[in-house]
Amino acid sequence: MGLLRYTIYRLMQAVPVMFGIAVVTFLLVNLAPGDPVDYMVAEQIASEELIEAIEERYGLDQPLHMRFLNYLGLPWFLEVLGVPGFEESPRGLLQGDLGLSMYYDRPVSELMLVRLPPTLLLMLSAYAFAIVTAIPLGVLAAKRRNEPTDHVSRIIALVGVSTPSFWIGIMLIILFGVHLGWLPTGRLVYPWRDPAHYGYSGHLELYYQTIRHLLLPMIALGTLQMATIMRVERSAMIESFQKDYVRLARAYGVPERTIMRKHAFRVSQLPVITLVGLNLTSAIGGAVLIEEVFAINGMGRLIIQAIGTYDYQLVLGTTIVVGFVFVIGVIVTDIAYAYVDPRVSYGEES
């Protein structure tokens, strides 16, 4: 099976997964305690006509199953097929419409497009920090097993795994922001904006300030990933060093650096790739807290606001997009297997 065919096959497998995510999220959101209309008209005298108008605008006056079908956009699909009785049906998820936010009264996709770039910037930088630091440390610890370097790396990994990200963020703010005053403690400077928006002289200063503002949240979010990857990298490298083909290479006098680079390192990256792909959800969960700690207006703060304001459409939209990102991450991980290890094939039986 070729790469393209395998990718299409995996994407088709993702369809029922995404449908399951939509069903479970829809039921959880709509069956949870609380009423969005009560929240919207709180602290004011609302007539019955106003409440009915709000429920009609957001489709809350319909039965639960009809609300779900409308959210998916099935009536619109039937209208396109020419089935009578479904004229002027609203668009839905199948047409790429994530609905209308009840709290902001704006399309969910529009809100997410504004909030997604800061979260991606934070997550990608945290992942880059984790991978760049964890893999060399893991290889070094495996190479010098049971030596002081290995003990130090294991202590770092243990502290990183057992310490919550938000606590690390608070400690970094107190140390580097409050006491030392070296780095800013909140908000991000977006590199895609005009430097004049922040009063900077040019793009060079803009990028410099972006890095300064990003350093603390990046370390806070990436520490857990770094510690986890380093532990797995160390274990995988130790296992590779004990393989027969590595011993055979040593017996033939192959230089140790060549053995590590060609025979041990590449095979050891399979569990690391798995970990990086599956940790996408934990990174998103960590970003929710880190964005709160550092006052970053990203997807995490948007999700918390949506839950606090009973914004059904916004909770559904953000959850489905996060689930979609996770599914894509898993598919990319599967594809990367065959690239790293030639023994792995695209869905063929051995």
Image (tube, rainbow, N blue to C red):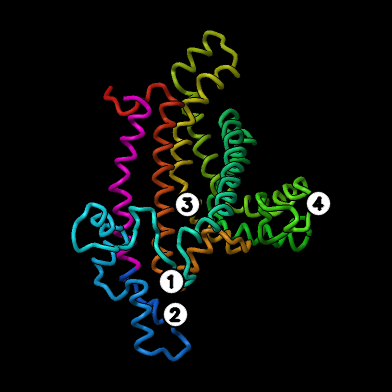
Q: Which residue is mark 1?
A: 102
Residue visible at 48% across and 88% down in the picture: 43
Task: State whether residue 338 is above or below residue 53.
Answer: above
Which amino acid type corresponds to the residue marked 3 in the rendered image? Ser
Label 3 SS:
helix
Which amino acid type corresponds to the residue marked 4 in the rendered image? Ser
The numbered mark, 2 or 4, whose residue comes first in the sequence reads 2
Q: For marks 2 and 3, give the CA distance.
A: 32 Å
Q: Residues within 10 Å of mark 1 (few under 14, many from 20)?
A: many
Q: Name the residue at the right extreme.
A: 201
The x, y position of residue 120, in whole percent, is: 55, 50
Question: In the displayed structure, does residue 65 sit left or right of residue 252?
Answer: left
Q: Nearer the viewer, residue 313 or 223?
A: 313
The numbered mark, 1 or 2, whose residue comes first in the sequence reads 2
Question: In the displayed structure, does residue 21 sit left or right of residue 40?
Answer: left
Mark 2 or mark 3, which is nearer to you? 2
Q: Which residue is mark 3?
A: 282
Point out the image quarter for the N terminus: top left
Q: Which residues are magenta?
A: 1-29
Q: Mark 1 touching mark 2, by CB under 8 A? A: yes
Mark 4 or mark 3, which is nearer to you? 4
Task: State whether residue 31 is above or below residue 12.
Answer: below
Label 2 SS:
helix
Q: For marks 2 and 4, give the CA distance.
A: 44 Å
Q: For marks 1 and 2, give the CA distance.
A: 8 Å
Q: Which residue is mark 2?
A: 40
Question: In the displayed structure, does residue 203 sit left or right of residue 118?
Answer: right
The numbered mark, 3 or 1, whose residue comes first in the sequence reads 1
Q: Which residue is mark 4?
A: 201
